[in-house]
Amino acid sequence: MKNKLIKKVLVCRPTYFSVDYVINPWMKPGTADTEVAMKQWKHLVQVYKKLGIEVNTIEQGEDVPDMVFAADQGIVQDKKVLLSRFRHRERRGESKYYEAWFSDNDYKIHYLPENVFFEGNGEMYFWNDLIFLGVGYRSSDETIPTLQKIFDREVIPLQITDPRYYHLDVAMLPLNNQTVFYYPHAYTLETQKILQKKIPNLLEFSQEEVLGFGGNSVITDHHVVLQKGNHTLEKKLQTLGYKTVPVDVGEFIKSGGGAHCLTNVLKETVE
């Protein structure tokens, strides 16, 4: 069994975070507390540093409240990045800030064809020699040829059917190269069958666990950083030999994103 060890991440300081519009069922405008959100974000950063992860920070633009969700901005591997193209116009202004950051830090930037939508690490996972890609709400099938060309892996599209789980990282959590958690009711029956065939140890989230943002956890080595209060999932993870690190990112969940959404992995190894 092989586990991923995160070496470096990119996060966005939530200076101007707020919930001002609705583009997913989680969003309730005016509910987020900016000061509390900043405290929660700083604590998450401290947790990463204690786990030995190098944390890089990008400053938030004043006009893009969802820019804090760094995972959505693109896929990074070996100093190359496929920059996202957001489906909703409310988020499109975020890309210029991340494009500039990647350029300034010597990443080779790849771009999608026009009118092809893809929302980065929120919508796909590298898993063994495959790429799992969530489609149905934010990303399109037309992304597949570009992903295959840049990253030289087979892409498996997974059809999402419930808008609450609009991104792949809301209802799926690859634990290691053998085990994946998922919430079956978020996907079509055909997608469920694909996952059952591909994954040796496919485990189900309960509804309570997935609504508690269990799928939006961050895994490094044998540590799982997850939203606090998800007690049954913690017990499952501990039984599987993982150490759980509960954090509170509840203010960001009001916008539909948890710890994983706040984190773009820049460098990791498999051990």
Image (spheres, grey):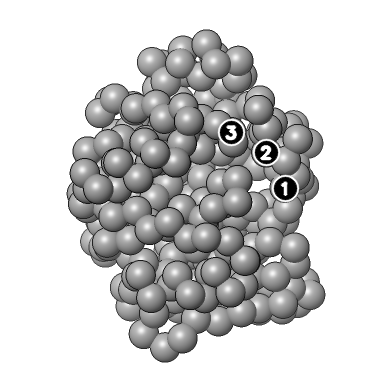
Whether label 1 touches label 2, CB < 8 Å? yes
Distance, label 2 to label 3, CA atoms, is 7 Å
Name the quadrant of the N terminus. top right
**Residue with the mark numbered 3:** 176
Depicted 139 relative to depicted 108: above or below? above
Q: Which residue is rendered at x = 27% and y = 36% of the image? A: 184
Whether label 2 touches label 3, CB < 8 Å? yes
**Residue with the mark numbered 1:** 268
Mark 1 falls on what kind of element?
strand
Residue 96: percent from left, percent from top: 55, 80
Dividing the picture into quadrants, the one containing residue 245 is top right
**Depth order, front residue of 249/24:** 24
**Depth order, front residue of 268/68:** 268
**Depth order, front residue of 256/232:** 232
Quick one: label 1, few (<14), some, or many (20+) residues within 10 Å? some
Q: Is residue 134 left or right of residue 113?
A: left
Q: Amino acid at mark 2?
A: Lys
Q: Which circle marks residue 4 in the picture? A: 2
